[in-house]
Amino acid sequence: MSKKTTSPGGSKKTGSKLNGAEIRQAFLDFMAETGHTIVPSMSLVPSDDPTLLFTNSGMVQFKGVFLGTDSRPYTRVADSQKVMRVAGKHNDLEDVGRDDSHHTFFEMLGNWSFGDYYKQEAITWAWQLLTDVWALPKDKLWATCFEDEKGVIPRDDEAADIWRGQPGFDASHLLFFGRKDNFWEMAEIGPCGPDSEIHIDRGPEYCDRQGVPGHVCHVNGDCKRFLELWNLVFIQYNRTGPQASDLTPLPKKHVDTGMGLDRIVSVLQGVDSNYKTDLFTPLLDTIQKMTGHNDQQRADNFTPYRVIADHARAATFLIGDGVIPGNTGRNYVCRMVIRRAFRFGRLIGFSEPFLAKVAETVVEHYGAAYPEIVKHKDSILRTITQEEYRFQRTLDVGVAHLNAILTHLEEHGEKTLSGEEAFNLYATYGLPLEITRDVARERGLEVDEADFDRAREAHAEASRTEVAVVGGEDVELYRDLLHTLQAGGKLGPDGVEYDPYNEPEVEEPLLALVKEGRRVSSARVGEKVEVVLPRTCFYIASGGQVADTGVIAHFKNADDEQPTWEIHVEDMRRPAAGVVVHVGTVKVGTPREGDQAWAGVDQDRRWDIMRNHTATHLLHSELRYFLGEHVRQAGSLVAPDRLRFDFTHNGMLTQEELSRVTRSVNEAILANYEVRVEYLDREAAIQAGAMALFSEKYGATVRTIQIGEPELFSFELCGGTHVPETADIGPFLIVSEEAAAAGVRRIEAVTGRAALDLMQQRLGALENVATYLKANPAEVDRKVLTLLDENDSAQKEITRLRRELMRRDFETLMGKVEDVNGVPVLAAVVKDVDADALREMTDWFRARTPSGVAVLGSVQGNRPHFVASVTDDLVMRGLDASKLVKAVAKVVGGGGGGKPTLAQAGGKDPTRLTEALAQVKPTVVEGLK
Ligand SMILES: [Zn+2]
Ligand SMILES: [Zn+2]
């Protein structure tokens, strides 16, 4: 661990001597000493914000606190947050590696106040840390505050005065800027406020626009002399609309700050580029060691070096947070950075996978601050290498193909590659759009990216999964409702009491009904409503476990059989902090606000869910035991009818592994272990070996589920509902095991009633098969094997006969050999065969014709394809098989390539096959010249 400062501002160790890790730690230490709770970085995968691809700023994990949908046990907090910016508004990918300061992944240092301290403390501490602890020269620092250029929102004189009062601050270094630079808004409506930035003047020698006519260096200018170091946001208003009058002061004011670690380290280490800090130099050194370049060569290739270092760092952290290379969303980004780094590796001479070595250096240097990448080191390195291998096979062909298309465009004076083609390159060769764009731009062409998105959408349509976005607009409604109910004494300070763990039913007055986004006093049969009770025992979907369903009803008399009204609860949600609603439909009568209500969970269904949840924990633990510690949960669904468990593992499980896992889960069930719930301190639980999920967010105290004694069988952080003892689960059966994504397996299993159903079904089927085979059930497998054997021989016979037919076809084809300027040339269509068959036929042709040319074409799956073969002697005379296939493929709208002696190609238009083959003769004549 690194140096601790003794008190805020008490350290005498100056910034310039600190390494990157020490600077990160010094920030956290300083914040701890000023009363901040230090929390771990949130995962790069935002756990509860489906609108965000990645955590893209330090405040993401506190967004709910500012919006009032979430609360925390602390009011001041600080962290070093992992951040990823590759898509949308913050797309810096183009600049990564080409300049000194853009990255895909980086770290944001930040401190926050939730209605606690405000401008005075935030500014004073920032000044102390920068000038006392890190000893930055006071006369080089500048501060900016907000002044509305439209004169509507008040100027932030409060912050300005605080700046002027800082010891040693030069009052002439205080500047005001308008909305673009110094006013922060989360969205069109919601929390907002002025901000104040601290900039440093690095000196005229850092200006990269010296000599540009009219250029003057200044804060927020366009050169590199002034750098913004730290942004302090003062959230003091709530915006309810676009007008100035729509800004209302917040009762509780917040502070939100952010300082990019790479940049502050570059300043403290006195270098002119983030890539020259010790956050990057070890990675660049590793690359250099592998290439064997001298320093000049390294300098000459700075873009590939930097892209590789940046992307290796990003991939390491992404995989460390459970993201795996794939085709959509986050997975696509992970794939893209690895492939893009690999392509840049090609440019500096790497021909084999190399990126894992760089990632290893990342783990070495960042592991102390982010233990998750140490813990998952093996799977990080393996995943990266595998992705490189996967790409290596197609990269060269893909880029060659792309270059051919680009040449074609250039020849026709076109400047834009269509999105359709770019998507085909991705679908066929795995070339991410970003690489296609790199290659195109290197040749001065662009890619139609909107068109690419459309093409991808069209392909993704089938596998689309809908993400439910928790409505932003009804937060207000529910917050108001909460305040009204609290003011009326109907709800306590914590709002609706949520306890799905004890009683399965409650009796409470119906506090509020909401219909179509509005509060109503009653509802009628058939209407969809949301019901608020003072407390509830219904579980809200989370951690993979689905929500409870059940009934809310009113009975006139205690012993009535029939309810006067009844609502069927179909779902549960928490639209705002402190508010839990039952989502359902009125089935009987007219529910009214104030009625006494009985609410009961569908208990049979709940038991099925609990069985599946506890079984999921047992399965997780057994998989780790049998397959190894690399197994990590990558997704989970706990439903009443089944459980689905995704986990990181390479290669399918063998039958034996599956049956061992099934057996031992069932043994754990039979052992009837007690399932204990314990609330523990988060750190202590993790120390004790509790498994925590990468994308979960935890408070200081966590709920743990422990199974087994005296030796713990399973120990997980979990908020779900469980059976009290494992024997309650009943039988456990694995239904399927398959790939969910690259490096991720998916198991589906059933327990309890569903497992019984399955066993009865399967045994019934077995009985039936036995009857068909006229065998007893125990002999069925051997009987089937015999049948399969017979079938196999029959298949072999069919294959043999087919080849014989092919031979005959070939003999017919040989009759079509023509003499072209003394060279035997065969250009012919073969009916409905694959590329392998075409290649085999060209082999036969060579065997028969020691000197000759064969180009064969066929159509399969409505797409034409070709194989061309040229004997060696004719290659010497100027013929080239790859030129031949290109010439024919062009006619059918395709392309291809290969060696001069053997090449193949594909195309689009099957109707022009014969026309395409007509190109062979002239191309041969041309080639022989
Ligand atoms: Zn300048
Ligand atoms: Zn769980």
Image: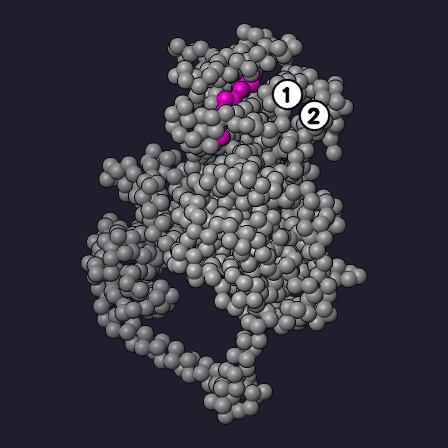
- The correct choice, above or below, for 683 with respect to 134 in the image is below
Q: Is residue 277 above or below residue 516?
A: above
Question: Which residue occupies 31% across, 77% down?
Answer: 805
Structural distance between the alpha carbons of marks 2 and 1: 9 Å
Instruction: Confirm whether residue 567 shows in the render.
Output: yes
| Residue 296 visible in the snapshot | no
Q: Residue at x 56, y 33 (%)?
A: 58
> Relative to residue 834, is residue 225 depicted above or below?
above
Q: Quadrant of the N terminus?
A: top right
> Bounds of the magenta span?
191-200
Quarter where residue 637 is shown = bottom right
Element assignment for label 1:
helix
- Quarter-of-image position of residue 864: bottom left
Q: Nearer the viewer, residue 234 or 132?
A: 234
Q: Amino acid at mark 2?
A: Thr
Q: Is residue 135 left or right of residue 750?
A: right
> Is the residue under label 1 in contact with that under label 2 (CB below 8 Å)?
yes
Whether the magenta-drawn stretch holds residue 318 is answered as no
- Residue 616 location, x and y as percent? 62, 61
Depth check: give the residue in front, 877 or 326: 326
Q: Position of residue 41 (x, y in %)?
A: 62, 38
What numbered label is drawn on residue 121? 1
Looking at the rendered structure, the secondary structure element under dot 2 is loop
At horizontal 46% and vertical 16% (from top left) the residue drawn is 154
- In the rendered structure, the answer to whether residue 80 lies left or right of residue 11 reads left
Q: Nearer the viewer, residue 612 or 712?
A: 612
Q: Main secondary structure of the magenta part?
A: strand
Q: Which residue is mark 2?
A: 34
